[in-house]
Image (tube, grey):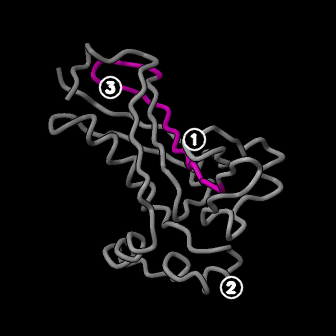
Amino acid sequence: MPKISDIKVGQVIRSEFDQINRELLRRYAKASGDTNPIHTTDAIAERAGLKGVIAHGLFSSGFIIKMLEDFVGEDGKIIELGIEMRGMVRCGDTLITEGTVTKIEDKRVFLDIKQTTITPVEIKKDKNVIKKFEAGERGYISEKDIARGLVKTKEVDEGTLTYRERVAAPGHAIIELNE
């Protein structure tokens, strides 16, 4: 656990998770008791107007809580957490969770929270698609995503990766650390 004297305004704590898949969502559904099939069955999710299963909101929120708990350790505590679930989290996404320190008062640390999804679409080499991810196969990326500048490219070992990067859950937190 960090000491309050070690924390600085502007400091960022971060975690990343890239193993979201259907089996994990099925296990979460069973453990949580939330067995709504839009989280586990593509055909039902599609009938509901989705292009495939989506993760439970509390599934992705759990990564925010875990990041904060890992940071505060056994002697610290989470005082407040508020988040808005704005974007769907899907199989194949990488979930990046960040907390940026905005203020420190006594033993309390105030953070802006941002949870972002990175959704891979395809990899091209010499203008040919050499790998298509689920987002590309199922059409998860919309014209609205493109117009909003959320679709990006970057060079990877295999070629040029096209992906969407969007904030799925913004929010805030207050944690308390002991000296």
Q: Give amino acid for label 3.
A: Arg
| Secondary element at image label 1 | strand
- Could you tell me the amino acid type at mark 1? Val
Q: Give yes or no for contact between labels 2 and 1 (Cβ–Cβ under 8 Å).
A: no
Q: Is residue 168 left or right of residue 150?
A: left
Q: In the rendered structure, which segment of residues is drawn in magenta? A: 102-122
Under circle 2, the secondary element is helix
Q: Amino acid at mark 2?
A: Arg
Q: Which residue does the numbered mark 2 point to in the structure image?
A: 47
Residue pictured at 78% horizontal, 59% vertical: 142
Q: Which residue is mark 3?
A: 108
Q: CA distance from mark 2 to mark 1?
A: 35 Å
Q: Residue at x 52, y 65 (%)?
A: 91
Residue 37: give x, y in percent of width and height: 52, 83
Return the residue nearer the eye: 8 or 110. 8
**Is 121 situated above or below 106?**
below
Separation of marks 3 and 2 at Cα, in angstroms: 46 Å
Q: Residue at x 58, y 81 (%)?
A: 42
